[in-house]
Amino acid sequence: MSKGPGHHPSDGVASVSKRPVLSKKFYFKELERLQLELVKLHEWVKATNLRVVVLFEGRDAAGKGGVIKRITQRLNPRICKVVALGVPTEREKTEWYFQRYVTHLPAAGEIVLFDRSWYNRAGVERVMGFCSEDEYWDFLRSCPRFEEMLIQSGITLIKYWFSVSDEEQENRFRERIEDPLKRWKFSEMDLESRSRWIEYSKAKDEMFTYTDTKISPWFVVNADDKKRARLNTIHHLLSMIPYQEIKHKKVELPVINMEGYVRPPISNQTFIPEIY
């Protein structure tokens, strides 16, 4: 791929020297260990009535969805919820900008993971012209105050930005296009994001200038290596919330009392074909 003078090798993050590929054995063993800790964390959140919000932002194909999937894989979806909002309705377009996100904030004992969040305004809406200049600058001025209110109300807010190089993004886009199982992930907006790489870089830099604050900092994930990005993000997330293991009582399963029950003929039921 040709690289012009404005080329950003890793979305504004210093490139990291090539490291050896993680073995599948190590990756899955470490992922299982971290997921066990996530189970302990989410049980602690439930038991202590914590409220946790985690934002996942970054370029298209940066790996946000993959990390979210590994975080939630072993967790109770009633405790750990994923929010991925679509295009706002005509009514929502007339609301206070943060309003549609506020309705998804956690109650006591819940974790909410935003797969893209209110930062849409500083990213795609800014670059694609979906918001006005006044709306954009109002967001940058209001966002730090909004997040400070969330934190002061007792919410733990953690923000991740997934940084991916243009070469790796291209590889992942091509994989999506060529793999029938991933083709649905590719959209016309992905094409636009590729053609406006520099505009997105500038929008991200400006967004960080206003919203990377001491009380609500951005944590950048080097996401060119998917496996490392997943493990590093989960490890960091665990470090951000002090938790303890909840000790459960030993469970004894009761004996089933079948007295007085006559099962109807099994032939009365319709079973699916056993193909496998």
Image: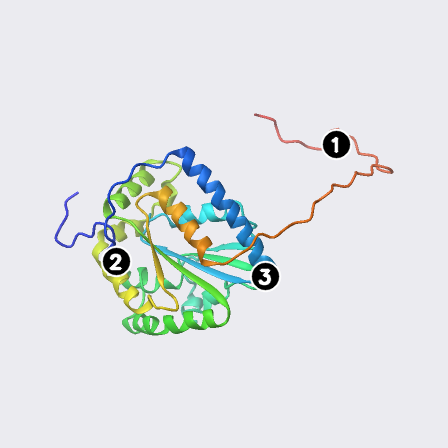
Task: Report the label total.
Answer: 3
Q: Position of residue 188 (x, y in %)?
A: 31, 49
| Residue type pointed to by label 1 | Asn
CA distance separating discs 1 and 3: 48 Å
Q: Which mark is residue 268?
A: 1
Q: Report the Cα–Cα distance between label 3 and label 2.
A: 40 Å
State which quadrant residue 108 falls in.
bottom right
Instruction: Name the residue type under label 2.
Output: Tyr
Residue behind mark 2: 200
Dividing the image into 4 quarters, which one contains the C terminus? top right
Which of pointers 1 and 2 lies earlier in the amino acid sequence? Answer: 2
Q: Is residue 129 visible?
A: no
Name which residue lies at 30% across and 37% down.
20
**Image mark for residue 48:** 3
Residue 42, how many percent across, how many down? 54, 54
Q: Nearer the viewer, mark 1 or mark 3?
A: 3
At x 27%, y 71%, the residue is: 133
Q: Amino acid at mark 3?
A: Thr
